[in-house]
Each structure stands twice: as C-alpha cells, then as structure tokens.
Amino acid sequence: MNPIHDVPPDTVAFFLPSADELVFSPAEVREQARIFAPRYGDPAWPFHVISHNPSSTGDVMRWARFPDSLREQFRQASWFLVRFPIDHLFQARHGAAFRSRLSASRQFRTVNDWRRFAWWLDGRGIVTLGEVTVEDLLDYNRHVVKELGLARTTVTSLLIGLSRLHAYSSRYMPPQHRLVEPPWVDEGMDDYLPAASPLGENTTEPITPETMGALLIWAMRFVEVFALDILAADAERGRLVKVADAADAQSPSHQSSAALTKYLGELVSQGHPLPATGLYQPLDGSGVSTFVAGLTGTSRSRALSILAQPRWRKYAAANPGPCLLGTPVTGLLDGKPWHPGITFQQAATLKRHLVTCCFIIICYLTGMRIGEVLGLEHGCCPDPEGPDDGAKRFVIRGRDFKNARDEHGNHLSAGVVRETGWIAIPQVVTAIRLLERITGPGLLFDALAHDIRQPDQRGGRSLSSSTMANRIEYFVQWVNRYANEHGRVDETIERADGERLAPIRFRRTLAWHIARRPGGLVALAIQYGHMRTIVSSGYASRSRDGIHQLLDFETAHVVAEHLSDVHETLQDGQGISGPAARRLITAAAVEHQRFGGTVTTARQAKALLSDPTLNVFENKQAYLFCNWDRSKALCEVGRSASDAPSLDRCQSACANIARTDAHADQMEAASSTLLEQVSSGMLPPPIADRIQARAQRLQQLAAQHRAERITIERRTT
C-alpha cells in the first residue's frame, strides 16, 4: 500500500494505520538514519530521523509515557500530525503565523505537550478525547497558568498544540475521539495567556565580566598555547591504540611477551615507576594495558596477564606511575611548561577540552547562534583573496537554521545558506583552523569525530547544544583544578553557586560587553571596542533582529542607566562640568521624562537610540561621560563613521566631554593612590616621574571640575 502521505487529505477519514506502517514518509528521513525509521506500532518514535539540522537533539517519543487509556488515540493523532499539513481553512483562521507543517523538533514538542494534557485528562477520569468539554479546556488553561505558573511562551505552545489536536482529530478521527474546538481558536489566545513579559534572548542573564573573561582567557590559552602539545599527544595515543589493536588481531607470541617483560624489567632496574595511573585520573587498568601493549606490540590480554603477575603487581603498588606519552611539552605559561607531561589517559580528555575551547571562541566572539556554530563545515572560512599587504577580512560562511522557511512558510530543517557571512577576527580563524585539522572534511563539530558513543546513530550529525553545555562545565572543572594545583588560584573561573555557563547565554553576554566595553576585566578588552562594527557588518543583510536587537537593547539599557544616575545626582544638588555639561543635563532630564531610567523592550531601545541627544556613554578609565555627537568627536578623526564613540581613543580637548562630582571624587582618590606609590621609593625614577605627572593631571582635572561645575539651581538663575 502506498503511504497515506501521498493521498490528498480531503479523501482521508477515520483511517487507522497498520502496526508496520512507516511513521514518516521515506522521502523525509535522512539517508544516514533510514535504518532507524520507526513503524506505527513501535514503542518509540525517534523524531530526529527527519531533521536535517546536524545539531538537532535526539528527540524520541516513548509511548509508554502516555496513560494507557488515551495512548492509542494520541498515537493516531500524532501520526496524522507528522503525515499531513494542517487544513488550509483552519490555518486561515489562525493567520499566516500558524504553520501548515511543523519542523521535527516542533512536532516532537507538540506531541510532548499532548502527553502533559493526556495525563491531566487521565487524572480527571476522562478516557476519550470526545468526552472533553470546553469547560474542561478552560480548567486545563487555568491549571497551567494559575496552578503551575508556566511561562507565557510555554502556555502559548500548549494552547497551539491543543488547537492542532482539535484540527487533526476532527478531520481524521472517529467522533468519539474528536476534541472539541478550544475557545481560543475564534477568540484569540491573549486572554488565555499569562501577562506579557520581555521576550526573546533579552530574558537571558549575561555572564559576569569576571567569569566570562576567565573562561575566554583559558579557552584562548588552549587554542593558542596548548593546542600543538595536545594534538601531538593525541596523535601518539592514536598510534599506540592502533599498535595494540593490531597485536590483538594476532595470536600472542613469545616475542611480544618478551618485549613487554624486557620493558618492565628495565623500568624496575632503573628505579622508575611502572605505568599504573594518569595524573588527575583514577587507576585505569584498560588504559594501562593499551598503553603498554602499544609500546611493546603486545596484545592487551597478554599485557593484562603479565601486569597481574606478583612481581610486577607488587612493584607497581609501591611505585605507581603515569602512562606518560613521549611527546614533548613545548607550550609555555609564564615562561614555564604548562604541563609536566601528558599521559595516555589525559590525551583524549585534553583534546575534548580543546574542541570545547574552539566552540567557546567561535560562539562567543562571532555572536552566532549555537546551531549555526555546530552546523559549520570544513572550508567555511576560506583565506581572503587579495594582495598580501592589503587589509584582509575573514568571512565565515554557514547556514541559518532559525529563520529558514520554504515558499509556504514552513520550516526547513536543513537551513538555508546565509547571503552574508559572519566577520571573523583572528582568534576565531585560529579556532576554525584547529577544528579543520582535527575533524577533516565535513562538519567541524562532527559527532563521529568528537564522540565515539553510538557511532551507528550519529552519522551526519554534530554534537548537540546540550553536549556542548556539559562539556563547558567539565572544562571549567578542569581549569579550576589545574589552577589550584599550579598556584594560580586567582585565575580560577568563579561563578555563583549552581550557575551554569550555558552557551545560550553567550550572545546576550557579547552584546552586554560590547555595550559596556569593560576595561581590563575580560580578554580582548580593547577588541570589544571594535566588535560592534565587526558583528554589525556580519549581520548587515538581515533585518534588525537577533544580535542587532541585542546590541540595541544593551546599548539603550546602559545609556538609560547613565542618564538616570546623572538625573539623580543633579536632584541631589551635585554638579556637571565640561564642554558638554549643558547637553548632558538636558539629556538627563529628557530621558527621565520619557523613560524613567528603565528600558525593557526593543521598541523603547529603538526610540532611545534614535534620539541623538540621548546617546551618552561613560568612560570609567578617563573619568568622564561622552555626550556623543559625531560631528564634534575627536576620536573619529581619521576613522570611518560609526554609531558609537571609540572610548579607547578619548581626547581631553573633545567637545563631547562632561564630568560629574563622582568623577572628580574618583580622580582625587586615584591621584592619592598614585602619589602613595611615588612616595614609597620602590619605583625607578623615570616611572615615578610619569606616575607623579599622571597624579598631578588628575588633581588639575578635579580642581577644574570643582571650579566650573554647573548645578540645576545655577543653570536656571
């Protein structure tokens, strides 16, 4: 029988598939996953087999998790969900945003939402969908909103799922299994949802500068300093494994046993420890056997039996040593080798951390979404063309998965190639080149290359976002252990109790740092001053959502904070000085009237940034506010036009400068600290002279502020 997917929906009614009917149309299933395509009667349906997004999660619906009384009704509705598009008349009632076909992940989520509903029905003693009344649906709505307190987006998903359940059951299932039409189909969902809150990625907490800075510093150390040592050790480990595998394929010989015995005897005669453990690792017998088998050409089984002999076991117990690889450590940290010697057991772990570091650098320093990073392929960042002496920009070419739609507005799981790539800074290019070397052709984060588990099910897929989140956690643990053991406690990656440095937070954190440009707190502090232009040009062809919206929101948020602080200081009787003092006072008053110091939506952010008189940025290192006016900005001389000041190029004679009493207090405190350093007598004369001149300059600026400060009272008289 032909799959029902090929039959026009108008001809289908009350159809129950046979147990061996394919769940998904064969044309939709990924080639590498066809052997895993489920049948209707299977206890589990893996939805990931129809996703062509390499980083898609392994979503599997297990029917045993549905209540017995309703399981088959929901199984039947789910089959129609994955096989047929929604009825066009029903779609028209919901609007264009109601997709006729769902992506694989959304199909799974819809069926999972139905599972929640099924258990709620079972708890009320309802055993068929036809028994459900409108009052029941309203009770369920109150349950998820009031009793469970679910988020607005979650409730929206649940209600849309019930709308689809009604549409499919009323068209294809017998009357006793048809769900009544939910009231929100005609009335709209707004009245059935929790109160609106800030949506999108802005609800994600940014990672603090101290934490993100330490994480990025260690990631760059791995990529730029440790990488060659790690790859050399991993290659040696791979060689030993191949030798051991080859020996296992042959019958044990006297020669191979003699080689191992000789190797152990030489270690004992020279007083060296026997291979038994790996640094930072517990005793690993299988690792030890592979190590010595690879060194001596002995089979693993023979190596284990020899190592278990009393003479060697007794000596190893008293003199245990690491399975040290012979590759040298060339990377230096503060002039010293970063590692005492990589062991057989450590090589794979360090390589995994290296891949994690490449992911951190690419994901964080480009602003790409997680799926976009995991979908990158070998050759995605070619060397730029042009003369060697000219300025070159590396561009990353990849796929957009989030906004990929076909002509009907339905999601394309394979994504679409972005018309404009992401601009890559050198650190990102280095990370990509390392991944290309590690994985070879194909996906940079190919699951088969980076995770040996279930190789038969991972073809054509990348590591998942959850896997990368877990690997970041393991990396942080390794760093903190290493820092504590090597006297670098001040370089540990500190974070709040229970905090996870999930990569989903990276985009928000990048926007946060660009808007504030922290100095000295994170790696590449100066680079952040240029990242706005780099990131913006990488997203130039897209509508102003995603990273643009994040940048706008964070910039507007910090501008509102600054102006609110200025307004409060003026109300307290404090003063403002500098060429832009009057402009800053006016801007603070206007911001207070229009925004009240708070920006919570993208619309407010856009409104604030569109007013050029409100573009105020603080430079804490120079103790000033920049009331940004491009026509008066000295930092723009000789540079291309930008939408924000270059705070690392502030000029003391700029007409955009304004200072508050707080800045004067800070300058006086800094001057006192510098003079204490000079008076200590511990500094060489040339350095002491420069520091003293700096302290005197700060005193002069503070005194100038005190003499010229403007207050609200003085300005209005």
Image (cartoon, rainbow, N blue to C red):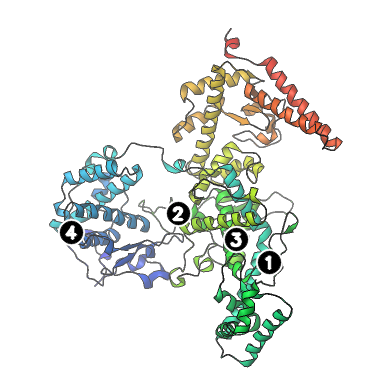
61 left or right of 588? left
Specify few, some or many for label 1: CA neighbours under 10 Å numbering under 14, 14-19, or 20 or more. some
Specify few, some or many for label 4: CA neighbours under 10 Å numbering under 14, 14-19, or 20 or more. many
Q: Which residue is the extreme one toward the right?
A: 685
230 left or right of 126? right
Q: Earlier in the sequence, mark 2 or mark 4?
A: 4
Q: What amino acid is found at the position of numbered circle 2 in the picture? A: Phe
In terms of secondary structure, where does tag 1 sit?
loop
Q: What amino acid is found at the position of numbered circle 4 in the picture? A: Met
In the picture of the structure, the residue carrying the numbered disc 2 is 401
Which residue: 48% across, 44% down? 546
Q: Is residue 491 visible?
A: yes
In the picture of the structure, the residue carrying the numbered disc 3 is 354
- CA gap between label 4 and label 1 equals 67 Å
Identify the image quadrant of residue 15.
Answer: bottom left
- CA gap between label 3 and label 1 equals 17 Å
Q: Earlier in the sequence, mark 3 or mark 1?
A: 1
Q: Earlier in the sequence, mark 3 or mark 2?
A: 3
In the picture of the structure, the residue carrying the numbered disc 4 is 173
Which residue: 52% across, 25% down? 564
